[in-house]
Image (cartoon, rainbow, N blue to C red):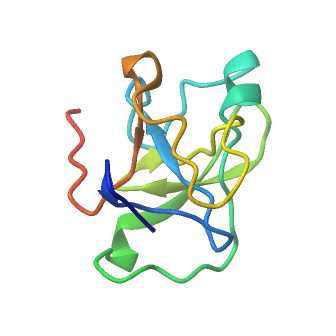
Amino acid sequence: MENTEVGEYLADSKGMTLYYFENDEPKKSNCSGECLGNWPAFFAKDFNVPYGFDKKDFGTITREDINAKQVTYKGYPLYYFAKDQQEGDVNGQGVKDAWYIIAKDTEFEK
């Protein structure tokens, strides 16, 4: 998908925006309980990687808290934002200075 404010970004097959949590660690989610209610985990068994992204950058973890799978990008778990209601919504960008959209040029600090 593309947005004038954030440029090209990662979304699921229905156009729902995908985010990462700055407080996560590679292959480990630090979002659980109420957090997970606001930021549902993204999982898809088979998915096409959009142009500009590399398939090898995607993986899967099994969450310890709910024993469910979650897709990762460069090791970081991917999430939806509960307040995104329709295709193209990017309401989660920058929330609490910890939630960000995944773009082609996203770099992780850790």
Image position of 75 with respect to 56: above or below:
above
With 81 as the anchor, is 58 left or right in this view? left
- What quarter of the picture does the N terminus occupy? bottom left
Q: Position of residue 21 (x, y in %)?
A: 45, 32
Residue at 39%, 28% (x, y): give it. 94
Residue 81 image offset from top left, x and y in percent: 63, 38
Q: Residue at x 55, y 54 (%)?
A: 17
Extreme front residue here? 4
Above or below — where is 91 with respect to 34?
A: below
> Image quadrant of residue 54?
bottom left
Taking the spot 71% from the left edge, 36% from the top edge, the residue there is 82
**Looking at the image, residue 50 lies above or below residue 76:** below
Relative image position of residue 50 (x, y in whole percent): 42, 79
Q: Residue at x 23, y 32 (%)?
A: 110
Question: Considering only vertical position in the picture, is 32 above or below 12?
Answer: above
In the image: residue 60, left or right of residue 45: left
- Judge by depth and name the residue closer to the eye, 24 or 95: 95
58 relative position to 32: left or right? left
Q: Is residue 73 left or right of residue 82?
A: left
**Residue 59 in the image, given as x and y percentages of width and height:** 49, 63
* Count of labels in the image: 0
Closer to us: 42 or 68: 42
Depth check: give the residue in front, 72 or 6: 6
